[in-house]
Image (spheres, rainbow, N blue to C red):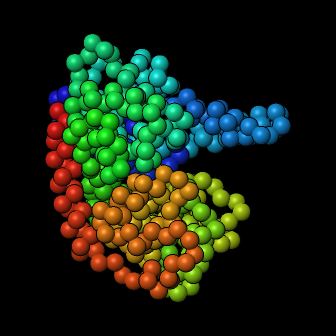
Amino acid sequence: MKRALLVTIIDVINLGTFLQAWASVRLLEKNGLDVTLLYYIRKKSTCFRIGWNKYSNRPILFRLFLTILMGVYTFLLRGRFIHFLKKRGVKLTPKAIGFDGAIKIGQGYDIYIVGSDQVWNHIHNSGIERTFLLEFVASQSLAPKYAFSSSMGVEHLSPNEIESYRTLVDFKAISVREISAQHELNNIGIKGVEWTLDPTLVYNGDEWYDFFKDNYLVEKLHEPYLLVYSVEGNLSLLEYYATEIAEHLKLKKYLVTVSIPITRNKLYDHVFSAATPSQFISLMYHASFVIVSSFHGTAFSINMNKNFITIIPNRFSTRIDSLLELVGLYERKVVDKSACINSLLEDIDYDKVNTILDKERKKTKKFISKIE
């Protein structure tokens, strides 16, 4: 059995990020690979630097206090998600911090794979992350490199970025998560790039529920509810539609979040703070209506055949646009308060959507079969 190293983003506190990492490992293992996940921490994402950069405009002592507080909070929540991966059978390397750490930790594998999150988003990564281009692999290594559903998150590359991405010509096979990324890579001479599903979409909603049905808290809440899940979006717009739709449908309002909200708890009938992946899956599965502002929130809403709307986040919406266009649900995208509530409440024809997804799942599995 060949040993594969998977490189993706796992240094953020985000449910979708860790669920895609778990799904990627599982899919690759089903393809006959012995998969290890690189425990990679970008230098900008170390526990200390997150707070230090976030509070740069505060007085020095207050900044230091907030940095320590944020560092402890990040350390605990990140550790919780890493524990989730280990508990679910994912093998991880020792911690590798920055490109030099990846060079030290990431050698000696038979196959190297990058994907599926926003690994190629130069804004999200504060520049080009050479680790996510697999440049840390020793030059004398003959191990093939692959990209699986990697995301750029942006529509166009700058001239400097183009030069960096031309190194992908050494990859044996590449798939991306957005049609715009496929076009961008084709335009700079990277041919044969495929457009595949995010790994979370390869499994359907019932399968996800079966994977994570060890959480019984949600099943004890015997009332219909509207679920809100926001990662990066227009909160006032999201709350406006949550209130309007909940009133129309006579639903309770639930919020699920990995953070610990303080100021907005009164807007909801129940808040699931510091939520686990199991809680998130169960809440999505049982919701009567869903309002999201993230790619994975959109993906799970579609996957679980929910009536939903997507409040487009403040940035990096190309991956959401690609998914909505793929399944013919672009009208579920909301950008302001002008959308007609009645039209948003119309039931989605999921027979058509599921037919499209089944076709794309086969296409994605076919790409995965090339990773050998």
Q: Is residue 157 left or right of residue 202?
A: right
Q: Is residue 290 left or right of residue 52?
A: left
Front position in the image: 325 or 352: 325
Q: x%, y% of residue 9?
A: 44, 39
Q: Is residue 26 above or below residue 173?
A: below
Q: Is residue 49 above or below residue 238?
A: above
Which residue is outermost to the top?
140
Front position in the image: 66 or 115: 115
Q: x%, y% of residue 58?
A: 80, 40
Q: Is residue 312 above or below residue 140?
A: below
Q: Is residue 153 left or right of residue 2?
A: right
Q: Is residue 250 left or right of residue 166?
A: right
Q: Residue at x 22, y 65 (%)?
A: 356
Q: x%, y% of residue 169?
A: 27, 29
Q: Residue at x 61, y 75 (%)?
A: 240
Q: x%, y% of residue 298?
A: 41, 62
Residue 219, by quadrant, is bottom left
Q: Residue at x 32, y 52 (%)?
A: 179
Front position in the image: 195 or 65: 195
Q: Can residue 210 be seen in the rendering of this structure? A: no
What quarter of the picture does the C terminus occupy? top left
Q: Can residue 364 be seen in the rendering of this structure? A: yes
Q: Residue at x 59, y 37 (%)?
A: 75
What quarter of the picture does the N terminus occupy? top left
